[in-house]
């Protein structure tokens, strides 16, 4: 071990690297557990990638064999059930963690100057994560995945002129078919991973380049950000071991939650229609998307004009992505901005209400 | 930027190409449909029977049928009544094979179009012979109830009130006793398979075997021959025992999965506690 360390020291200056990036790198002194959600999201992505690669050993992306291959993974492949359930449960937890990370970044004012690009890249990562979920949802070729994809890919048809074309490009044919499965599979394993990795690299680069933002309390006195500088926190604790240990604890909490679901409610995200093979001639009674799409789904049901509903949602997504450029206020602390605070909680309550309504 | 665009274009092409190619192949080699019996939601029979055109007493039929076991299993109007469910003009023509309300004596043949084995055993039974010779024996509807409301049959159909309409309950009680253990075994297996399915175990093969065994058994007891049922019960018990062993293995696997997941939970809990204690010590 010491020899390896010396070998690396000569070549990459390991000691200096460790000091500058870990032990002497300071994080804000009032840093809380919400700051660890980024690394938890990273670990969640990592586990998705690892379990996804293992599932690829047995999964067959063909409409005739996909369902059976998933059944084989669940019942015959050694520990296939474990890796599939980790992938399924992990995908849902990953969305929750990324969404929480975004919410905490919003609440802590971490999107403000100079971190606008970090926010935009982060929100694009959230959209990419949802893209992963959407494309992966079809792959088991179950009743649920087939009909949920039919509903989702039908949404663009509400757009005049290009709607039908977008739908056909997504499906690869008139209806959800083997061609759709191939497209979604390719997107899931070949298109989205490099896209996410690129966004991740940019996100991490920006976080390290600009520095970690301090919690809003006491940040009001900060001098204005006129020229670039690294946001140092000389009075804060070191990144390693203080912050790393916090992150490690949160990662173990994430893993405990994941395996608790696998142990006690393995079918939480896999209802009966998810264990029935796709049947294009038999529409299930209740087609519902996953929990994270329930609010937009309920909103679409609520607004009578489908085009208006989708257009409104697209506008909301754009507002979400570009929020740092809309909110120009120099106040970091959301608690001192009652209107924004009320809007923040109002949106969350409406979102939860729509999710509940959509689930019924 | 150029490199990024090149990478994105490359992966886009990779994702689109197989889809387009498969689409082409699909046109060359059309696929057969997947489903065995899709549920029928709408046809001209339902349209008419829910409209003002028809007498009020017939309007409840589609509502009752939608709650029935037949509907759940994809059995629709034309499966029993014949006719053309796609063409209103031809829907009730005898030339389209339409049969309206069958006479009591015709009911076994009506149901026997699908339940062939059961019909044969029934016709050879005392019940069937009585119906065919005197016209006064019980047909399917007497025991199973209104065809449009029909539900999954169970052993409780054999009861004093129903059997007592025609004869004493003594022989029927004997029959019920002969059936009871096997019926209980079938019901338990059915419940167990549902639990296994809810635990994400593949149960399709076992479900098929159970369905076949149950169908054979139900066919048998329509003979209303207690001795025959008693003689063949061992054969069915053996089949069901084999199935029970497979189900038991499924439960063992399910328990293993849960224990394994709990083991991993404990590992991470331990790891979390160690990190917490170490971090406190170092700070």
Image (cartoon, helix red, strand yellow):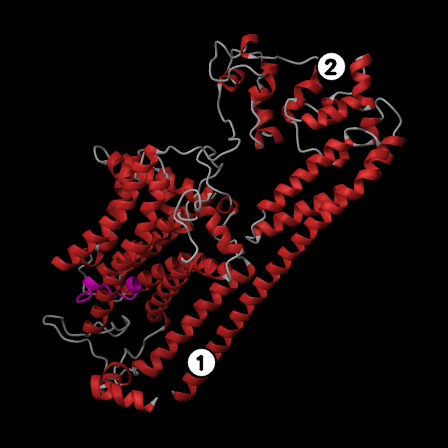
Residue A170 lies left or right of residue B281; in this view the side is: left
Q: Residue sitting at 73 percent across and 36 percent down?
A: B217
Query: Which residues fall within the magenta stretch?
Result: A105-118
Residue B202 in sight:
yes
> Alpha carbon of mark 2 to alpha carbon of mark 1: how far?
80 Å
Q: Chain of mark 2?
A: B
Which mark sits nearer the N-terminus, 2 or 1?
Answer: 2
Q: Quadrant of the N terminus of chain B?
A: bottom left
The answer to if B18 sits in the magenta stretch is: no
Tag 2–tag 1 contact (CB < 8 Å): no
Q: Quadrant of the C terminus of chain B?
A: bottom left
Percent position of residue B117, x then y: 70, 28
Q: Which mark is residue B276?
A: 1
Considering only vertical position in the picture, is A293 above or below A213?
above
Q: Quadrant of residue A288?
A: top left
Considering only vertical position in the picture, is B239 above or below A205?
above
Q: Residue sitting at 81 percent across and 22 percent down?
A: B127
Disc 2 packing (10 Å; few <14; some 14–19; many ≥20): some
Percent position of residue B212, x then y: 66, 38
Q: Chain of mark 1?
A: B
Residue B93 in sight:
no
Percent position of residue B266, x then y: 53, 73
Q: Which mark is residue B105?
A: 2
Q: Residue sitting at 41 percent across and 71 percent down?
A: A251
Q: Residue sitting at 69 percent across and 35 percent down?
A: B215
């Amino acid at each position: 071990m010491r020899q390896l360390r010396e070998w690396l020291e000569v070549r990459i200056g390991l000691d200096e690297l460790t000091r500058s990036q870990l032990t002497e790198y300071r994080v804000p002194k009032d840093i809380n557990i919400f700051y660890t959600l980024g690394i938890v999201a990273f670990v969640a992505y990592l586990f998705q990638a690892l379990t996804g690669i293992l599932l690829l050993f047995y999964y067959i992306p063909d409409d005739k064999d996909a369902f059976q291959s998933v059944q084989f993974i669940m019942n015959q492949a050694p520990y296939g059930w474990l890796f599939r359930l980790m992938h399924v449960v992990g995908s849902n937890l990953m969305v929750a963690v990324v969404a929480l990370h975004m919410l905490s970044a919003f609440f802590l004012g971490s999107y403000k100057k100079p971190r606008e690009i970090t926010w935009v890249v982060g929100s694009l990562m959230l959209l990419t994560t949802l893209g992963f979920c959407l494309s992966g949802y079809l792959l088991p070729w179950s009743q649920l995945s087939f009909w949920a994809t039919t509903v989702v890919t039908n949404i663009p048809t509400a757009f005049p002129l290009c709607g039908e074309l977008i739908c056909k490009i997504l499906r690869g044919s008139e209806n959800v078919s083997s061609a759709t499965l191939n497209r979604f599979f390719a997107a899931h394993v070949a298109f989205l991973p490099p896209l996410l990795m690129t966004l991740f690299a940019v996100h991490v680069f920006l976080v390290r380049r600009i520095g970690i933002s301090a919690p809003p309390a006491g940040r009001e006195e900060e001098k204005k950000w006129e020229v670039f500088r690294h946001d140092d926190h000389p009075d804060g604790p070191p990144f390693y071991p203080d912050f790393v240990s916090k992150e490690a604890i949160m990662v173990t909490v994430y893993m405990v939650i994941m395996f608790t679901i696998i142990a006690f409610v393995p079918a939480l995200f896999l209802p009966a229609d998810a264990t029935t093979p796709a049947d294009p001639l038999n529409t299930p009674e209740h087609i519902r998307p996953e929990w994270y799409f329930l609010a937009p789904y309920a909103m679409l049901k609520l607004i009578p004009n489908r085009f208006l509903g989708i257009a409104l949602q697209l506008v909301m997504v754009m507002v979400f992505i570009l929020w740092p450029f809309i909110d120009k206020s120099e106040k970091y602390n959301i608690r001192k901005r009652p209107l924004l605070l009320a809007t923040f909680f109002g949106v969350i309550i409406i979102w939860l209400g729509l999710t509940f309504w959509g689930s019924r | 930027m150029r490199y990024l665009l090149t990478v994105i274009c490359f992966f886009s092409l990779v994702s689109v190409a197989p889809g387009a190619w498969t689409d082409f192949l699909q046109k060359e080699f059309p696929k057969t449909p997947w489903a065995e019996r899709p549920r029928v939601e709408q046809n001209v029979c339902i349209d008419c029977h829910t409209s003002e055109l028809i007498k009020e007493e017939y309007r409840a039929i589609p509502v009752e049928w939608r709650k029935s076991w037949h509907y759940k299993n994809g059995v629709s109007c034309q499966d029993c009544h014949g006719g053309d469910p796609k063409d209103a003009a031809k829907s009730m023509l005898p030339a389209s094979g339409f049969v309206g309300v069958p006479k009591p004596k015709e009911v076994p043949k009506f149901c026997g179009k699908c339940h062939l084995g059961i019909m044969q055993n029934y016709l050879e039974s005392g019940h069937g012979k009585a119906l065919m010779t005197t016209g006064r024996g019980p047909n399917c509807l007497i025991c199973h109830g209104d065809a449009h409301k029909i539900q999954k049959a169970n052993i409780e159909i054999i009861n004093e009130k129903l059997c007592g309409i025609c004869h004493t309950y003594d022989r029927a009680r004997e029959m019920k006793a002969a059936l009871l253990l096997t019926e209980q075994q079938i019901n338990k297996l059915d419940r167990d398979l549902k639990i296994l399915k809810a635990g994400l175990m593949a149960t399709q093969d076992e479900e098929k075997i159970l369905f076949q065994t149950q169908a054979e058994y139900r066919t048998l007891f329509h003979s209303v021959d207690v001795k025959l049922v008693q003689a063949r019960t061992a054969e069915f018990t053996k089949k069901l025992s084999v199935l029970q062993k497979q189900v038991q293995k499924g439960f063992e696997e399910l328990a293993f999965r849960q224990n394994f997941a709990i083991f991993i939970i404990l590992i991470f809990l331990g790891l979390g506690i160690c990190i917490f204690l170490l971090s406190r010590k170092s700070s």
